[in-house]
Image (spheres, helix red, strand yellow):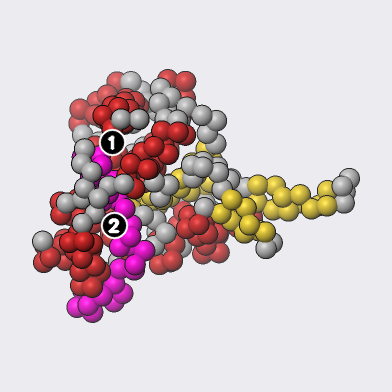
Amino acid sequence: MEREKIYEEITKIKESIKERIKIRDEILNLILICFFTESSVLLDDVPGVGKTTFAKVLAASCDFDVSFKRIQFTADLLPYDILGIEIFNKETNEFVFKKGPIFSNIVLADEINRGNPKVQSALLEAMGEKQVTIFGKKYELDFPFFVIGTQNPIETEGTFPLPEATLDRFTICTSFGYPQKEDEFQILKNNFINFNEGSIRKTISKEFIKIVKGEIDKVYVDDNIINLILKIGEISRNKKYFNFGFSPRALLHLLNVSKGWAFFALRDYVIDDDIKNCAYPVFNHRIKEDKKLIYKIIEDIL
């Protein structure tokens, strides 16, 4: 498929999504980059701004037999509620594996910080390796596999803060925020409280996801850009900034999201501004200290 045609299709996908969920272009671009590259997104936002609706709209936009599951995390949730469990079949005298909701193309881990640490850790292998291990047996996850985690930043009672290992699996952390006045007018005018899957145009095929992923992979990254990313990691590990600096995986996430950002900007190469635009959503959930220090690090380098 020619690149111009790919851009046209991406524009149609974005327009279709924005007909139902009002979201800023830069946020939508970031989430779609992660979707096309099978990365994971953490939405840190107040209730009622459209996080669940967005996940439903994205699933409904897929023009294939997509499986979408919403997992409501609670304190009594157990790992097998997510991964699945082996059940003994008396007729065959064998154990049969019953798949859990993680075996879906799009997984919404709703209020993930309400699950206990053991349950949270059940997602690590799935997000990192696109597989799960149950009783020593490995099960591959279907393509595509995309996780959207959500948490409420204003309510901490009854929650379990996400450990570093879990946070580091999420490629980006961002938020929708409150909609603009004109967008909220349309939300009220069209009474968007009810979700109608049939009203969503199916614009995303499996083949198109593979094509976009391949194009993003081919975006050129000069050695100077790689050295710039390495410098960010080096400065972050200086104790005057953070207790713990950014991991190599975090730097890889910045590299890959920046490639996607460049591709969405109609370029086949990464520039400094791509790094600047992607640094905050990639790093902000990975630090406990003042998040504004991310901007200072970038400014010091650029």
Count of numbered badges drawn on the protein: 2
Of marks 1 and 2, the one in the foreground: 2
Note whether residue 114 is visible.
no
Query: Is 288 left or right of 170, judged from the image as shown?
Result: left
Distance from the alpha carbon under mark 1 to that under mark 2: 22 Å
Label 1 vs 2, first from the N-terminus: 1
The residue positioned 36% from the left and 38% from the top of the image is: 212
Which residue has dot 2 on it?
254
Labels 1 & 2 near each other (Cβ < 8 A): no
Magenta stretch: includes residue 251 = yes
Circle 2 residues within 10 Å: few <14, some 14–19, many ≥20: many
Residue situated in front as seen by the camera: 50 or 86 = 86
Residue type at tag 2 = Leu
Residue type at tag 1 = Ile
Which residue has dot 1 on it?
23
Q: Secondary structure at mark 2?
A: helix
Circle 1 residues within 10 Å: few <14, some 14–19, many ≥20: many
The residue positioned 67% from the left and 59% from the top of the image is: 137
Question: For the magenta stretch, what is the residue range?
Answer: 237-265
Q: Secondary structure at mark 1?
A: loop
Which quadrant would residue 26 be assigned to in this image? top left
Residue situated in front as seen by the camera: 213 or 16 = 213
The correct choice, above or below, for 255 with respect to 246 in the image is above
